[in-house]
Image: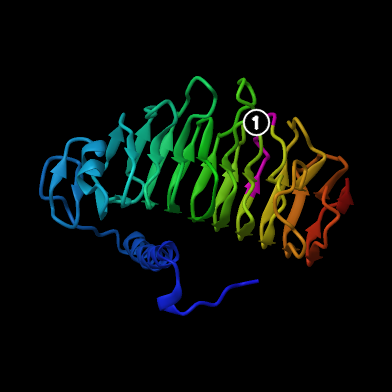
Amino acid sequence: MRSYLTPTARPLPVRIANAFDHGFFLAVLLMALFLITGTAAKAQSGQPFVIKENGRSYATLQAAVDAIGDRRGTIEIAPGTYRQCAVQTAGVVIYAAREAGTVTFDRRACEGKAALVLRGLGAEVRGLTFTNMAVGDGNGAGIRLEKGALNVAYSRFLNSQQGILSADNPTGRIYILRSTFSGLGTCEHSAGCAHSIYIGNYGELTVRESRFEKGRGGHYVKARTANVILEDNSFDDAAGTGTNYMIDLPAGSKGSIANNWFVQGRDKENYSAFIALGAESVLHDPDGLVVKDNTARFVPGLNRASVFLADWTNSRVVMSGNKLARGLTKYELR
């Protein structure tokens, strides 16, 4: 049951998260305006990492993160390709490209994990590209989220072992908007499969208007979150190799999977389902999950039998308005 609290009665973490959300939505609007106009403020220094609140600039991303410390700050990043990474341990940090799509973090992973290792109160990532992230255990990611809230918008995760990987945080939430996940995933290491997005036991995962394509193993979205909102995305597996499910909710989830577009490719490790619900130990009651108005098919010329939603929980899933190609069964209890 949703808890309705007065503003003064809300716990501090809830008030912080709500304020963080409001700032993110404003930032997304400003980013959209920037994409339309193509204008942005120019840094006043030759150093590429500028803290907007005070104008100070730094030669490394880590130095800028450390300067913000346990406060809130925005790091504006000059165009370029960087062999750098950073670990955030406190505060709320916004990592923003000065010009969307012109900033790339390539190959460098901190702590053997990711380009950004996040365990502060929260973080936002705007307009950045992460590519060629690989580490010894097979979990190299653009972002490793270990604690706190995360917002991602207009960003790209390319040709790496994972795009975004998280730990568990049952009170946390993750919001991803208009981002691309391409050439990700692997099942070739002892740590198990990596995925385009792999989220642990978080409170909520929202992914909207994003693209998943060219998977190299594992699932496109795997999440143990209590709630999911996966809406208006495309899952194009036509050029995938050795992939599994498009969406895997192994612990059970409530929420909405709606208005997505799915194409299953030929080269699959497991083609038995597009969406899997509760295939592992069920942590969350998925009763009432809504799956509606999606379009799902196979690549042209492929004749195969598969299931759109495979359910291991025997829960009440609400399905309506889904347009399924020939050979696809709407629902199967397993």
| Residue ID for mark 1 | 217
Measuring 41% from the left and 68% from the top, which residue is drawn there? Answer: 15
Task: Report crowding for label 1: few under 14, some 14 to 19, many 20 or more residues within 10 A (C-alpha).
Answer: many
Give the magenta part as a residue range.
Answer: 235-242
Nearer the observer, 115 or 12: 12
Measuring 10% from the left and 45% from the top, which residue is drawn there? Answer: 45
Against 329, residue 271 (above or below) is above
Nearer the observer, 7 or 276: 7
Secondary structure under the numbered disc 1 in the rendered image: loop
Residue 74 is covered by the magenta coloring: no
Q: Quadrant of residue 287?
A: bottom right
Nearer the observer, 133 or 11: 11
Measuring 61% from the left and 28% from the top, which residue is drawn there? Answer: 186
Majority secondary structure in the magenta region: loop
Residue 68 at x, y = what percent? 23, 48
Residue 272 at x, y = what percent? 82, 39
Q: Quadrant of residue 304?
A: top right
Disc 1 marks which amino acid? Answer: Gly
Residue 59 at x, y = what percent? 17, 36
Q: Quadrant of residue 197?
A: top right
